[in-house]
Image (cartoon, rainbow, N blue to C red):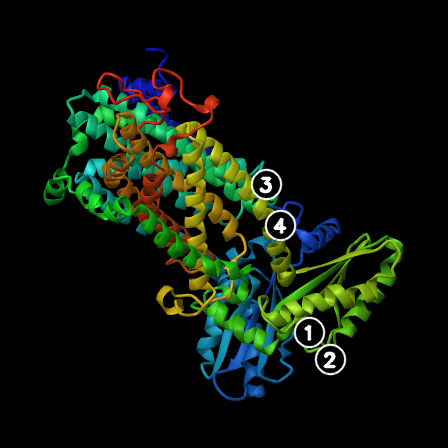
């Protein structure tokens, strides 16, 4: 019979030593989580994020070793309606100054600064201590400002600035993450109860998913000392971890229950599940990991961080499904089916899913050519808007306006345009050229005056900072337009192509670059369009190899690639329709930026290619198993899809539900991520699986299983390139087992 696969041996040991396996898993999760928190997180530096010209500018600034600027917040005084009463505003400013000087953590309160048009009065507040932690210490200032507002209700008195906006954003993101956690658990559990009809069986996948997420969170902080961690990594670990953790254990638990229903013992049922679903879980997990590894080729810390977090949580979920899951199933035995939910349990016992799916498949099986043509054309039509996709980073103007800090920010930038979008000109030159550089920067700042693309300079003159060693100088130039506006982009082009070269190009030994929010937008979008073909090529090639080796069929591998491209393209088109237009703003609670968040298309591509393998591996495995028994292709397609319908549908519903929760969060990037993933999985699990796949495989017939001689399976069925027939005594399929 030969040596058993490693998945079987791991499951057998866990099933025979359940308490040891469970204890080892708990210890593993605890060590990962606690160890990661103790090690802390390393965040990306300018060197890690150096993309394009803006990246070079930030590296120059980092080389200048500038002293940290103290954190500055502001008290903004404006009229509630009409013109601002200057005397009343001055009295409020005096009161605010006196009160804030007594607040712990305030180093200095500056003189009030009137707006040019007289619409506002600004009191700058310099905070003491580390500027990086200022948002954590700004609460006393907010409280003092609130007291001033209460004493002067006739005017609007608000706290606004980096620290107060940072606190508001942290609070919003924290609530979002908590909301995602709170909602994802009951929603997932409810779906699993419907799928299993028993509470313990429904709880096991959730338990595995949560423990996988916890372990991966800790491991990602440890890994950040090798690959810096980004802001979105934690959200992505939760998103991917809940999806794959539930899916993998769902497939495994389903198969174990089926084997017990056939009269197998607990350990034998677990072993058979390991041979079939366990093997498929390894293949699916490997496909996801390979796809996510493609992000490392993008060459920037954001994607490397997302890849690291995703790979870790998938690997941990696979490990858990092969170790602690068999132990739990063996220990619980028939208690897995307790306590039963009466009505749902009876409905699940009737097995109506297969009959429903056979009816759904009827058009694809009876008229495959017409069904394929219509469905592919429909998906291509849905994908067509993706050709007009625009990429932009969300800026401050895209943050939710539900917070008082962001409403105050809008009033601040309206009254003081130089506090809005800023271009950063960095110049690096020998110290002997420092005076020439500064003169050139003053000239550069002067050349922007009178140009409507740039904001007027403050009365104090150009904002120029020079490093202690006089080798780096930085000029900040403001534009009165939002970072994602066409006018802001025009000002960047004028600065980079005309003004900066004219002022700085003749200084010997000097190099310069322009950064800022607008520059980062443009540079990163160019970077994405440049690297996306490289990442896509890597993912396509390795996915093809994995599928070809798993199914011993070049045709199956090629059709898998084409179907995934089709569903990904349709998801892109849907995202463009929703987020680059305004019709869905009220429905989803967002303001359109006219673009897709810059990092999303590449990330979505690799995630979708990885996750779609879940369904493809399990569904095509069932189809090929039926063909191996001698069933004609048309019937095998019906048997395979209908036979796996309950499991795959439950897994898809869980994924769509978890991803949809992210569409309800506050920030535009999480909304787009949730909608994109949910749409793609929904399309993949419905139109692709129920229409395109069956019609295509029916048309191809025996050609589905063609492969070159070196790839064909060896043994007594090699002539047909098919797996062994299903024999009750032969539990190990030659290919990937059916779920």
Camera-side mark, 4 or 1 = 4
Residues at circles 3 and 1 in contact by the CB criterion of under 8 Å: no
Answer left or right for 439 relative to 146.
right
Answer left or right for 1 relative to 154.
left
Dot placed on the residue nearer the N-terminal end, 4 or 1: 1
Residues at circles 2 and 1 in contact by the CB criterion of under 8 Å: no
Mark 4 to mark 1 CA distance (whole Å) = 30 Å
Mark 3 to mark 4 CA distance (whole Å) = 11 Å
- Label 2, residues with CA under 10 Å away: few <14, some 14-19, many ≥20: few
Image quarter (top left, top right, bottom left or bottom right) of the C terminus: top left
Camera-side mark, 3 or 4 = 4
Q: Where is residue 557 in the image (x, y as percent from the top left)?
A: 44, 35
Residues at circles 3 and 4 in contact by the CB criterion of under 8 Å: no
Q: Residue under label 3, please give it.
A: 297
Quadrant in which residue 86 is drawn? bottom right
Mark 2 to mark 4 CA distance (whole Å) = 37 Å
Q: What element carries label 2?
A: loop
Q: Nearer the viewer, residue 442 or 700?
A: 700
Camera-side mark, 2 or 4 = 4
Is the residue 625 above or below the residue 642 in the image?
above
Image quarter (top left, top right, bottom left or bottom right) of the N terminus: top left
Residues at circles 4 and 1 in contact by the CB criterion of under 8 Å: no
Mark 3 to mark 1 CA distance (whole Å) = 37 Å
Q: Position of residue 627 (x, y in %)?
A: 29, 29
Q: Residue under label 2, please give it.
A: 450
Dot placed on the residue nearer the N-terminal end, 2 or 4: 2
């Amino acid at each position: 019979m030969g040596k058993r696969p490693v998945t079987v041996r791991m499951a057998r040991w866990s099933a025979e030593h359940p308490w040891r396996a469970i204890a080892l898993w708990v210890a593993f999760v605890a060590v990962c989580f606690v160890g990661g928190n103790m090690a802390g997180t390393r965040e990306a530096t300018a060197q890690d994020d150096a993309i394009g010209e803006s990246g070079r500018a930030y590296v120059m600034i980092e080389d200048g070793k500038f002293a940290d600027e103290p954190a500055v917040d502001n008290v903004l005084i404006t009229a509630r309606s009409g013109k601002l009463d200057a005397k009343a505003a001055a009295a409020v400013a005096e009161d605010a100054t006196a009160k804030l000087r007594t607040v712990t953590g305030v180093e200095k309160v500056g003189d009030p600064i009137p707006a040019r048009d007289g619409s506002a009065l600004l009191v700058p507040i310099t905070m003491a201590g580390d500027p990086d932690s200022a948002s954590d210490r700004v609460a006393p200032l907010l409280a003092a400002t609130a007291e001033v507002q209460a004493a002067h209700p006739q005017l609007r008195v608000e706290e606004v600035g980096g620290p107060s906006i940072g606190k508001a954003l942290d609070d919003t993101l924290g609530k979002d993450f908590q909301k995602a956690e709170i909602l994802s658990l009951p929603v997932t559990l409810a779906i699993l109860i419907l799928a299993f009809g028993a509470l313990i069986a429904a709880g096991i996948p959730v338990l595995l998913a949560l423990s996988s997420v916890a372990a991966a969170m800790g491991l990602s902080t440890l890994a950040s000392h090798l690959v810096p961690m980004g802001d979105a990594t934690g959200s992505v670990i939760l998103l991917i971890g809940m999806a794959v953790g539930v899916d993998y254990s769902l497939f495994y638990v389903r198969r174990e229950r089926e084997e017990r229903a056939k009269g197998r013992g607990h350990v034998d049922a677990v072993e058979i599940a390991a041979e079939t679903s366990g093997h498929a879980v390894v293949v699916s997990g490997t496909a996801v990991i390979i796809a996510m590894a493609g992000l490392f080729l993008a060459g920037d810390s954001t994607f490397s961080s997302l890849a690291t977090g995703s790979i870790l949580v998938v690997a941990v979920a696979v490990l858990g499904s092969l170790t602690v899951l068999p132990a739990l199933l063996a220990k619980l035995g028939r208690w897995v089916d307790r306590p039963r939910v009466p009505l749902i349990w009876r409905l699940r016992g009737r097995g109506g899913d297969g009959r429903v799916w056979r009816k759904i498949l009827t058009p694809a099986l009876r008229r495959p050519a017409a069904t394929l043509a219509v469905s592919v054309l429909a998906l291509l039509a849905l994908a067509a808007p993706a050709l007009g996709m625009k990429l932009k980073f969300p800026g401050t103007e895209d943050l939710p306006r539900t917070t008082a800090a962001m409403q105050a920010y809008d009033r601040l930038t309206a009254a003081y345009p130089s506090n809005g979008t800023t271009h950063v000109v960095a110049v690096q030159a020998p110290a002997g050229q420092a005076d020439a550089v500064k003169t050139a920067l003053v000239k550069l700042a002067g050349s922007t005056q009178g140009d409507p693309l740039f904001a007027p300079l403050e009365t104090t003159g150009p904002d120029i900072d020079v490093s202690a060693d006089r080798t780096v100088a930085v000029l900040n130039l403001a534009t009165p337009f939002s970072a994602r506006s066409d006018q802001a982009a025009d000002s960047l082009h004028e600065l980079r192509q005309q003004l900066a070269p004219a002022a700085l190009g003749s200084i010997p030994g000097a190099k310069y670059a322009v950064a800022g929010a607008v520059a980062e937008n443009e540079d990163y979008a160019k970077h994405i369009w440049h690297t996306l073909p490289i990442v896509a090529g890597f993912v396509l090639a390795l996915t093809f190899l994995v599928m070809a080796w798993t199914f011993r069929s070049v045709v199956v591998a090629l059709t898998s690639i084409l179907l995934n491209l089709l569903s990904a393209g349709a998801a892109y088109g849907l995202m463009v329709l929703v987020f680059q237009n305004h019709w869905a703003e009220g429905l989803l609670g967002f303001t359109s930026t006219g673009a897709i968040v810059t990092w999303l298309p590449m990330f979505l591509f690799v995630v979708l290619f990885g996750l779609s393998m879940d369904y493809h591996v399990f569904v095509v495995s069932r189809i090929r198993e039926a063909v191996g028994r001698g069933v004609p292709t048309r019937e095998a397609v019906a048997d395979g899809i209908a036979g796996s319908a309950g499991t795959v549908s439950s897994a898809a519903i869980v994924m769509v539900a978890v991803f949809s929760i992210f569409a309800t969060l506050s920030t535009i990037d999480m909304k787009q991520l949730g909608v994109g993933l949910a749409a793609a999985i929904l399309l993949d699990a419905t139109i692709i699986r129920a229409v395109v796949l069956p019609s295509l495989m029916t048309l191809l017939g025996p050609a589905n299983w063609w492969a070159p001689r070196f790839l064909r399976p060896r043994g007594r069925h090699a002539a047909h390139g098919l797996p062994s027939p299903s024999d009750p005594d032969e539990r190990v399929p030659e290919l990937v087992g059916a779920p």
